Amino acid sequence: MIRDTSHQDAVIAPKAGHAIKRRALMIAGAVGVAALCFALFSTWRSSDASVNAARVRVAEVSRGTLVRDASVNGRVVAAVSPTLYAKASSTVNLKVAAGDTVKKDQVLAVLESPDLADVLKRETSTYEGLKAEVARQQILSRKQKLLAQKEADTAEIERLSAQRTLERYDSVAQVGVIAKIDYQKAKDALQSAEIRAKHAAQAAALEGDDVQLALKTKINELERAKLSMQEAQRRVDELTVRAPVDGFIGTLNVQNRMVVAANAPLMTLVDLSRLEIEVEVPETYVADMGLGMNAEITLPSGTATGKLSALSPEVVKNMVLARVRFDGEQPKGLRQSQRVTARLLIEEKPNVLMLPRGPFVEQDGGRYAYVVRDGIATRTPITMGATSVSAVEIVSGLKQGDKVVVAGTDAFNNATRVSINQ
């Protein structure tokens, strides 16, 4: 039989005073636990509610520059997206399909309008007829001028003949070869010829002015007919619908060989080389917005900057449409109607008390905040100023370094004091 080691054990007597020391430690531990329980009980008695610290988020009041901004939703739209219309009641012959890529001045559709074609034929016929009349009037003008000049020349010849006759009579009148009465007749004949020659010259000049005026009238009629023909030609040329810019066909509003009325939309052309962001801005921010305001656009490929380029004067469902134009080069990979978010930078306020934004801003209209001191969150009245997406300005009620519950206050039930349990 194997013996155990019990014969080797020895009893050691405790030192003097060890039991007293052990008893003192136990009493001190009991007192500490009692004090802690009393403190917790006192804290619980002094608060109206108790919330676990994991359910709240606490932030510290700091001083810095507050960037007042607004976060809005938007979509990518084409800066140039013209809609093409029918210029007259016509039949449409489409040359493209939806989604086709087109170049500037490319033929997109041809409109058939018999009415405009007839108008062009009439105007062309009228123009050609007046053109022939002008040519005929030019011939008549030259003929009338020649006849008037012939009469003037004949009267001049008669004047010269009468003058030479009087000169012969003057040479022999001194010697009394001719009768005095014949000499007087020769003088009268000369005066009569001079008067006829003078009147014939004036009549020829007036006839020239008359035929020139008649020719000018015909030429003016020809110019009017030419303008009417050109206008009819322009309207016929507009029946050939061409692309005003490079892009692609976004929407076709008609089908091939469809009869459309005047000013009916035919198709929409989208220019993807110039894109902008169309954002919906809440009505409350519109008063502080202006053209040229900076904006940050969040895209799948990163962040881009831009400026507010247009602002609609109309409010629709408490929203105002605005356009943001990219700064510099347009980002790659954007698509028409792609959804994005943007941040409009309204203003900067330096050296202000700030607090991270949280649900407490919407509760009680932002008039109260829970300040945490020694594990107790006390409901404190505050005054807020400017707000941004990530922070709010504190005008009064808090000081720098205060700990404030910014999230989770919905569980406080508007209690005055709330205990925050670790």
Image (tube, rainbow, N blue to C red):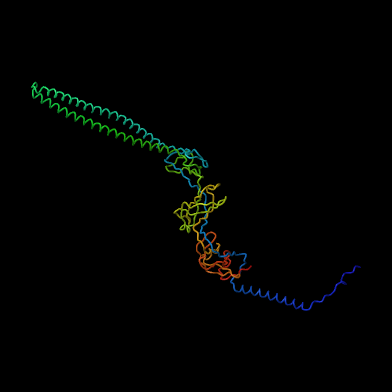
Quick one: 15 or 144, which is closer to the camera?
15
Q: Hey, which quadrant is residue 421 in on the image?
A: bottom right
Residue 84, compared with residue 164, is above or below; it is: below
Q: How many marks?
A: 0
Quick one: 275 or 65, which is closer to the camera?
65
Q: Hey, which quadrant is residue 371 in on the image?
A: bottom right
Q: Residue 382, position in %: x, y?
A: 52, 67
Q: Hey, which quadrant is residue 135 in on the image?
A: top left
Residue occupying the point 43% across, 43% down: 263
* Side of 266 relative to 159 (left or right): right
Residue 153, compared with residue 318, is above or below; it is: above
Q: Residue 375, position in %: x, y?
A: 61, 69
Q: Residue 323, position in %: x, y?
A: 48, 51
Task: For the N terminus, give its image quadrant.
Answer: bottom right
Task: For the C terminus, give its image quadrant.
Answer: bottom right
Quick one: 262 or 312, which is closer to the camera?
312
Residue 135, compared with residue 251, is above or below; it is: above
**Residue extending furthest right?**
1
* Side of 163 relative to 335 (left or right): left
Residue 12, compared with residue 109, is above or below; it is: below
* Side of 233 relative to 108 (left or right): left
Residue occupying the point 38% across, 35% down: 120
Q: Residue 87, position in %: x, y?
A: 42, 41
